[in-house]
Image: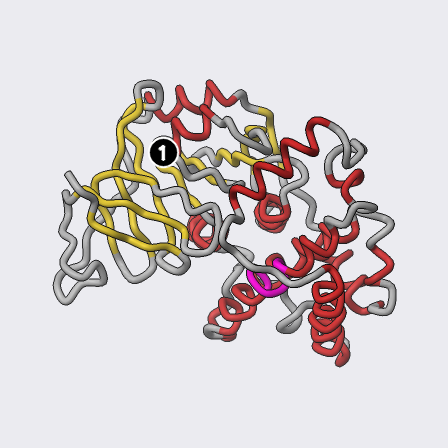
């Protein structure tokens, strides 16, 4: 088992998803606390500009976005399984719903003025940090459209009601007797809502969801050990190699973009900061680019294909 380094911060819902997966797998991991807002020079040294949280580091390989991170962790520690073969593609489908539809109503609904102090360390909405966080998130979400708080509240009730109905037959987890990736993806939003006591009563009618969440939370976070961000960069610099990669042959998923081409990889929904590098790996599931940093050395940055745009860059 290689050393797993999770770059995260305490109040990040997607970070909680990965922390719970590490707990479910009973894994040891190294914990790097990253800033909530820009600037993030140590993050950029490893990712090249990807600034979402969290990301996973294994030596000089950097894995971005939690669906890819979860698959990597499951490949390294297959038991207990996150993707039970008997369930087919359903865990992936439900996890994507939870990471998108459920997430994008739970987070804005919880981030009402009365909930904000509980999400940012009991600081008031008028604090300097909150104002900086507000501006940072506004830049990340520029161009996106969300519903009103009332819209989000109605959708939270509907979506959590779907989970409640799914658990009505007495199953302990969303898809049966064992947890899967769908449980951890849905749990992140419930966790976030519960962190804000003035908002949490929206969950009160859903007793089965509460018991289900408690079962997920009981897995804990595994065995984290703190690590300084500059040491994580040094680990990348002295790694001396990368995970194997290949570019699939024609008719390939890159529409004619060959290995060695300069490319950019950009999220398609929010935080649309392009990361530039040299294409070294490509499949229908993953794109890998190589980039050079003065401190981190040569790193390979991995992205999922879903939710990202791959383009040839101008030389």
Q: Position of residue 123 (x, y in %)?
A: 78, 31
Q: Tell me if 291 is positioned left or right of 13 in this view.
A: left
Q: Relative to residue 169, is residue 75 depicted above or below?
A: above
Relative depth, front residue between 307 and 217: 307
Horizontal side, residue 58 vs residue 294: left or right:
right
Q: The residue tagged with tag 1: helix, strand or loop?
A: loop
Residue at the image point whose x is 69% and y is 50% from the top: 219
Q: Which residue is mark 1?
A: 48
Give the residue at x 30% y 19%. Answer: 294
**Outermost residue, bottom side:** 169
Location of residue 95 in the rendering, given as x and y in whole percent from the top left corner? 55, 64
What quarter of the picture does the N terminus occupy?
top left
Nearest the viewer among 177 and 134 is: 134
Q: Position of residue 218 (x, y in %)?
A: 74, 51
Magenta span has 50? no
Dividing the picture into quarters, in which one does residue 220 lie?
top right
Residue 102 sits inside the magenta stretch:
yes
In this rendering, would 292 be left or right of 49?
left
Instruction: State the residue in front, 72 or 197.
Output: 197
Residue 23's place in the image compared with 103, above or below, is above
Magenta stretch, main secondary structure, is helix
Q: How many marks?
A: 1
- State the extent of the magenta-drawn residues as a range: 98-104
Q: In the rendered view, would you say 72 is above or below 104?
A: above
Residue name at image x 53 percent, y 68 percent = 91
């Amino acid at each position: 088992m290689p050393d797993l380094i999770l770059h995260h911060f305490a109040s990040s819902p997607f970070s909680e998803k990965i922390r719970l997966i590490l707990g479910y797998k009973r894994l040891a991991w190294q914990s790097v606390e990253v800033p909530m807002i820009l600037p993030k020079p140590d993050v950029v040294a490893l990712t090249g500009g990807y600034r979402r949280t969290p990301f996973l580091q294994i030596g000089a390989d950097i894995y971005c976005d939690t669906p890819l991170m979860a698959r990597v962790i499951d490949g390294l520690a297959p038991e207990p399984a996150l993707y039970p073969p008997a369930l087919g593609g359903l865990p992936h489908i439900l996890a994507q719903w939870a990471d998108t539809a459920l997430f994008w109503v739970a987070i804005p609904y919880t981030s009402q003025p009365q909930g904000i102090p509980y999400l940012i360390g009991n600081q008031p909405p008028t604090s300097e940090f909150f104002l900086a966080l507000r501006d940072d998130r506004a830049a990340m979400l520029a161009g996106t459209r969300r519903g009103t708080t009332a819209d989000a509240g109605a959708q939270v009730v509907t979506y959590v009601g779907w989970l409640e109905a799914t658990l009505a037959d007495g199953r302990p987890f969303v898809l049966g007797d064992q947890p899967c990736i769908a449980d951890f993806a849905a749990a992140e939003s419930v966790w976030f809502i519960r962190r804000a006591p003035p908002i949490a009563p929206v969950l009160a009618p859903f007793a089965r969801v509460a018991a289900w969440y408690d079962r997920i939370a009981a897995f804990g976070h595994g065995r984290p050990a703190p690590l300084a961000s500059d040491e994580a960069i040094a680990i990348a610099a002295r790694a001396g190699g990368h995970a194997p990669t290949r570019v699939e042959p024609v008719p390939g998923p890159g529409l004619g973009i060959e290995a060695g081409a300069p490319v950019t990889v950009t999220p398609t929904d929010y935080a649309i900061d392009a990361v530039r590098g040299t294409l070294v790996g490509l499949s229908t599931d993953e794109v890998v680019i190589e980039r050079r940093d003065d401190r981190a050395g040569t790193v390979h940055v991995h992205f999922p294909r879903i939710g990202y745009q791959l383009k040839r860059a101008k030389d």
